[in-house]
Image (tube, helix red, strand yellow):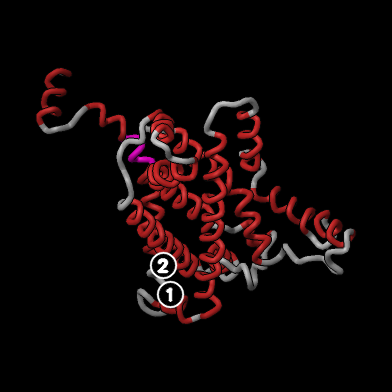
Amino acid sequence: MTTGLRHRLAERGVDRVLLLLVPAVLTLVLLFLYPMLYGVGLSLQPRTGGLLDNYRAFFADPYQSGTIGKTMRLALPAALINVGASVPIAYRLRGRFRGRRLLTAILVLPVTLGTVLVADGLLRYLGPKGWFNRVLMAIGLVDEPVRLIYNYWGVLFSLVITGFPFAFLLVLSYMSGIDPTLERAAATLGAGPWERVRRITLPLLAPGLATTFVLAFVLAFSVFPSANLVGEPANETRVMAIAAYDAAFEKYDYSMASTVAVLMGVFELVVIALVLLWRGRLYTGSTGGKGA
């Protein structure tokens, strides 16, 4: 009976191994698809008015719609900085040398700290009475403390510190997957170090950088603790996540909160689609090595 069932499934193009995907699919439906669809449906049930009145109200209110630009101005630079800083560091650490593991561990250490602990460290280090301002005033560079927290810069610093380890590990894995013999072959043909990076490493790494940027952007776009702890949540760093929180837990308007959450997903998908469209135009062949 088991053999007969296997043959009947095979005739219909169904491999029994695919049944192993059933738990993952069910988990995806229960924990992602259903909540997402429920949120979309809730956003179309405003307290007053028609289906799209929540969306109209959001874009008609400059205080609400302004959160889109504020979120983008934080998420895009943070993702670019994290990816851009990861490339030269990963390039130097991809080889084998003494102390490589220790350096890698130090670079990914912020992952273990958490957003709240990083924010607390920034408050103590960059605050008006923190070490950084004390040193600047002690050596006479400034007469009064430099304001680096409770504004845009404090949130950006926090996003870079917490987001860099993820970007670095991804870039390092992609970089390690590029076959080193390609660069050695180019060197034998007379290509200099910069030319090898420009013509071999970067083109092969570009698709991976696009993927890393997407993940770093999504991580930074949902910024909430940093915007509250080291930002100015009522004004300069009032991001979309804070707008959704205010609607849900201060005004108890869950329909509007769902609207903001849906719009967050839409804007994320737009940026992701643009990046992946650009990625599709890049080199997508094998890079050789263990990352092939």
Please name the amino acid that badge 2 sits on: Ser
Name the residue furthest right.
138
Dot 1 lies on which element? helix
Residue 292 image position (x, y, % from top left): 36, 32
Q: Is residue 248 magenta?
A: no
Q: CA distance from mark 2 to mark 1?
A: 7 Å
Which class describes the residues within 10 Å of circle 2: few (<14), some (14-19), or many (20+)?
A: many
> How many marks are shown on the rendered structure?
2
From where the camera sits, is residue 284 visible? yes
Residue located beneath label 1 in the image: 54
Label 2 or label 1, whichever comes before in sequence order: 2
Residue at 37% over, 75% down: 52
Q: Nearer the viewer, residue 123 or 180?
A: 180
Question: Which residues make up the magenta segment?
Answer: 22-27
Give the main secondary structure, helix, strand or loop, of the magenta stretch: helix
Please name the amino acid that badge 1 sits on: Asn
Residue located beneath label 2 in the image: 43
In the rendered view, tell whether residue 94 sits above or below residue 253: above
